[in-house]
Amino acid sequence: MPNALRIGLLGPLLLRDEEDRAVHVGGRQLRVLLTLLALDAGRVVPAGSLADEIWPDDPPGNPGNALQTLVSRQAARPTRSRRTTRAANCSPISSAWTLAAAEQVCADAPLPRAGVLPALSGLVDKSIVTAAERPCGEGPRYGMLETVRAYGLERLAEAGKGDRVRDTFAAYYLDLAETGDAQLRGAGQRRWLLELAAEQDNLQAALRWAIARQDGDIAQRLVLALGWYWMLRGQPGEPETLARQALALQPRERSPRMAEARMVCALTAAGPMWEMDGVRPAVTAAIAGLRRVVGSQPDDPSAGRDG
């Protein structure tokens, strides 16, 4: 057998030598050994690709969980800890992400912003993270398998970093949504419709996290920023539910911006058929709140924040 082998596991197990020639693999024990070696090198085994080979006599009921456990055992080794941490920091991002998002969300004391791109490149090389080029030379969008994402979330929780990283994730996508909202009202509308569509899963995940955290300020600002986008796209369903949940929260900030946000939450919750009966009290309260604050602090949206 050649000394240098390249192992590909995203799909059937493939081995190639240094001249890219296929190398025959025989026997379950050898396949399992190579699988474990590949995992130890940071490769990812998707559920179903090798589960039958690893457990031919007693296949697991949930191959994804079984493979995740296998990955966890290998990742627990000290030589893997740095790579595991880097992947875990990206796990709260629910869908594909850009380099800019990774630099904001994944950077921390051990991994400064300048090190995020090299770290991502290393994770791509190890098939822990995927990269797909975007059109117009805008750079790739990165992603990871759900098994790896779930494992990363577990590691973040164990390290006590889950909430902090998710808060950073929500703050980044709030800024993106507010930037996009302004651009949708001008010459950049077409580009930003595409940009926000590509980020929709992450934007709504950020909103769900803010709601779960009972953060009325972030949640209602996200609905305010996404309201026009949702209307342009004509997307009933989850936006209405999320807006209704955000509306039930009490923000700390008292400002024209937040009064407008509550109004947009109520109107979004009413749905495309404008079913106002259920949200009329909220609309009335939002109008009253807007009347109270308009004129008293028009140039400082953060004025009136409690504490």
Image: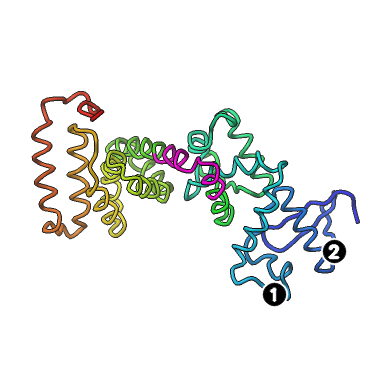
Tell me where the magenta segment starts and ends, as one range.
Answer: 154-170
Residue 110 relative to residue 295: left or right: right
Q: Quadrant of the N terminus?
A: bottom right
Mark nearer the viewer, 1 or 2: 1
- Residue 38 vs 60, above or below: the answer is above
Q: Which residue is at the front of the view, 263 or 232? A: 263
Residue 58: give its label: 1
Q: Which residue is at the front of the view, 293 or 6? A: 293
Q: Can residue 125 be seen in this view?
A: yes
Q: What element carries label 1?
A: loop
Q: Is residue 288 rendered magenta in the image?
A: no
Counting from the top left corner in percent of width and height, residue 67 is at 65, 61
N-terminal of the two: label 1 or label 2?
Answer: 2
Density class for disc 1 (Cα within 10 Å; few <14, some 14-19, many ≥20) is few
What is the three-letter code of the residue carrying label 1? Asp
Counting from the top left corner in percent of width and height, residue 256 is at 17, 33
